[in-house]
Amino acid sequence: MEVFVKVVEAGNLSRAAENLRMANASVTNWIRNLESHLGVTLLHRSTRHMKLTEEGATYYKECREILARVEEIENSTIMGRTAVRGTLRVDMPIAIGHQILGPSLVAFAKRHPDLNTVVNLTNSVDDLIHRGIDVAIRMDAVHDGDLVARWIFEDRHVVCAAPQFLVGQDIPKHPAAIAPRDCMGYITTASTKPRPWVMRSGSEEFNIEPAHNLSFNSSDALLQSACRGGGYVYVLHVLAKDFLKRGDLVSVLDDWEMETQTFYAVYPQSRFVAPKVRTFIEFLQRDVFETEPTSASRTIPQLVARRHA
């Protein structure tokens, strides 16, 4: 089962063999023997492509649940309920990984020396299950009914700029005082048009459409450019707070209410949540974002508006 799951998640036999530190021929034999034992074809294989059969897709999903349950039993029996081991594969947005979770995970690694944590920094939201990702940090929504999302944190946006950029001009009190050409934009991989800045004050709502000639798909890059006097940026407070504290950036329009952003820990739906996944989520809630751990989770069955940091 472990070999079969690794093959599916790697996408081909040779990559799975490398991950398993086995010979290609050994992996091939394991799959053939498994198919012979079950009396079904699990994978359609060619020299270039591999595709799950209908039976293979069903078997793969069941295997993940069984292996998660085995891991849970082994951890609680052999190493104690507070110990986790194995490999934890995590996806997270680039800026969140650089500025928040990356540094925090040093403490997580020291606390769990038998757990190998592999972090992939990406703003992509492609399929988690078939890439073998155990848990991912996502914002606002997922679009796969086979995934479960657990709330971990909520944050608001701020508008800020470098002190040297603001020299010689009045600090804006109303969004209308900010020229769109001075606003650097955030773009997603699916669009070249920057995301609008949405803000409210009482019953008044005001949107700014960034029109700067410089845009990024990373909040980290936006912040670094703002520190060099590039212009105004609209980013999450959790990402900007250290820059604000050092005085590298100054927030404006503080009396205005900005959009909020919700962070979720997303993982494949299963009857059993692997101990390493549960431990990681509780670490995020208790140690990183200082929000109370909760056993509540909810399935997100359809796509709704998604934002990225």
Image (spheres, rainbow, N blue to C red):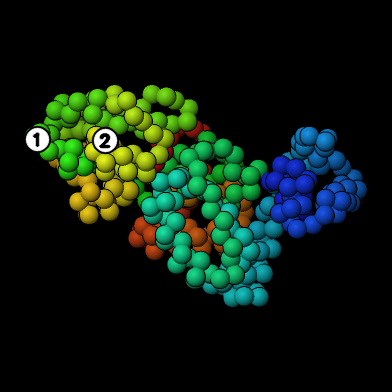
Residue 282's x, y, as percent? 46, 61
Side (left or right) of 108 relative to 179: right
CA gap, disc 1 and disc 2: 15 Å
Residue 18's x, y, as percent? 74, 53
Residue for point 15% across, 26% down: 176
Side (left or right) of 53 relative to 215: right
Residue 305 visible in the picture: no
Side (left or right) of 169 relative to 212: left
Q: Using the image as rendered, state which of residue 165 and residue 152 is in the foreground.
A: 165
Q: Using the image as rendered, state which of residue 260 and residue 65 is in the foreground.
A: 260
Residue 94 visible in the picture: yes
Q: Give the number of the disc on residue 168.
A: 1
Residue 195's x, y, as percent? 35, 29
Mark 1 is surrounded, within 10 Å at the Cα level, by few (under 14), some (14 to 19) or many (20 or more) other residues, namely few
Pointer 2: what residue?
230
Q: Using the image as rendered, state which of residue 44 and residue 203 is in the foreground.
A: 44
Residue for point 38% across, 60% down: 288
Residue type at mark 2 is Gly
Instruction: Give the SS element for disc 2.
Output: loop
Mark 2 is surrounded, within 10 Å at the Cα level, by few (under 14), some (14 to 19) or many (20 or more) other residues, namely many
Residue for point 26% across, 30% down: 183
Residue for point 45% across, 67% down: 107
195 above or below 148? above
**Quadrant position of the N terminus in the picture:** bottom right
**Quadrant position of the C terminus in the picture:** top left
Residue type at mark 1 is Gly
Residue 157's x, y, as percent? 28, 41
Q: Which of marks 1 and 2 is nearer the N terminus?
A: 1
Side (left or right) of 150 relative to 174: right
Q: Do the residues labelled 1 and 2 touch (CB within 8 Å)?
A: no
